[in-house]
Image (cartoon, rainbow, N blue to C red):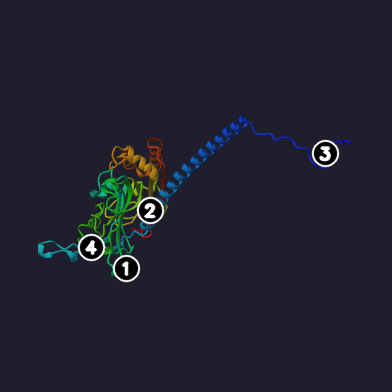
Amino acid sequence: MNVPLLPMAGRPHRRAARAFTLVEILVSLGVLAILLLISAEVIGTVQTTWSNTNARVSQFREARTAFDIITRNLSQASLNTYLDYDNNYLSQDDTAGVSPIAPTRYQRKSDLRFVSGKASTLVPSGGGAGILPGHAVFFQAPLGVAHDPAFAGLDRLLCGRGYFVQFTSDEFFRPEFIASGSLRFRYRLMEYSPPAEQNLIYTDPTVKAAWMAKAGVPLQTNETSVDRSLTRPVADNIVALVISPMVDLSATGATAGSGSRSSTLIAENFEYDSEQLTLANQLGLGQQGTQYLLPPLVRVVLVAIDETSAERLSQTSGSPSTAPFGTQISDLITSRPASQLNQTLDDIGKILREQYRVNYRIFSATVSLRGAKWST
């Protein structure tokens, strides 16, 4: 007898497996390709942004370090001012028929010097305004720089120091294995740093600028530990330096009736020379005015661009050795008074941003000179 077979209890009924169609596979591949393209675009954008940001941060970190060096050293500027007779009859040569002149009063004197102004004027061997944009500053400070190892422990030796921006190549400080045909021209913040043993301020009292005469001279080859170049780069891509001596009017005798006087009145054209007699009988400073006095305050401004922008400017300026900005920025700085410096900086930023389309940053601070002792 035939008995029909019944399905076993608990065993599921099997169904035929359904496969993907060709259309579904093509759609899936298309969606995956779109996602990969979007991911690649996002990754590329992030990488480019990170690279540019990293370059700017790295470059501006160098500029910040240079800015800190300037402000720190400038704050230590000294004149070692002393009082002496206005006429010293002991120095008169009576045998030459010169009648001795008796002194009438005491006056300030100094063998040191603080000077700031146009870089193209103060650094005559460094080039014109297109090569030396903005200002330069030179001063004496107890910084203890010495080339002779025997003086290494004398960290308070009096030294000359100067800062200015110069458009120059890296010929003298690049490694020897790099071909000389690929010189890199950049705006650089330069530091003039003669050692204490070459401080010539007492060599000839009639030539007080002798100690700063070598500023801007190109670096020399075959340097030794006791014979090195006196002008060296501190940071690349610093396109302008501004030095603005200032005074705190509330700390002088000019508060009453000073009217519209500005704190920049001691150097409204940015030029300050401690040897010059200016503002006589003003600001409560007596007959000598600002002569043999340090400015109480100095505003320091650095304008920096990043390396990517500098490389692009080098390629579009016609020749790597051609200064990209010419005299445009320098003329803007030197053609306006110090009281309009903020507006000048705004215009410089506009030029860099809109005309040259570069990434830039402006560093600014007002430094108090500890050696400034104003008295009548």
Instruction: Look at discs 2 and 3 and give the one toward the viewer.
Output: 3
In the image, what residue type sits under mark 3? Pro
Q: In the drawing, does residue 286 fall left or right of residue 1? A: left
Q: Distance between the residues labelled 1 and 3?
A: 103 Å
Which of the image's four quarters has the C terminus? bottom left
Instruction: Look at discs 4 and 2 and give the one toward the viewer.
Output: 2
In the image, what residue type sits under mark 2? Ala
Counting other residues with Cα less than 10 Å from the Cα at mark 3, is it few (<14), some (14-19), or many (20 or more)?
few
Counting other residues with Cα less than 10 Å from the Cα at mark 4, is it few (<14), some (14-19), or many (20 or more)?
few
Q: How far apart are marks 1 and 2 (CA)?
A: 24 Å
In this picture, is 176 found above or below 22? Answer: below
Q: Residue at x 32, y 68 (%)?
A: 152
The disc label shown at residue 66, or none: 2
In the image, what residue type sits under mark 4? Tyr
In this view, the residue in front, 337 or 24, is 24
Q: How far apart are marks 3 and 4 (CA)?
A: 119 Å
Whether residues under marks 2 and 3 lie with C-beta atoms below 8 angstroms apart, the answer is no
In the image, what residue type sits under mark 1? Ala
Judging by the rendered image, the residue that carries numbered circle 1 is: 152
* Lower position in the chain sequence, tag 1 or tag 2: 2
Judging by the rendered image, the residue that carries numbered circle 4 is: 202
Whether residues under marks 3 and 4 lie with C-beta atoms below 8 angstroms apart, the answer is no
The disc label shown at residue 7, or none: 3
* Lower position in the chain sequence, tag 4 or tag 2: 2
* Lower position in the chain sequence, tag 3 or tag 4: 3
* Lower position in the chain sequence, tag 1 or tag 3: 3
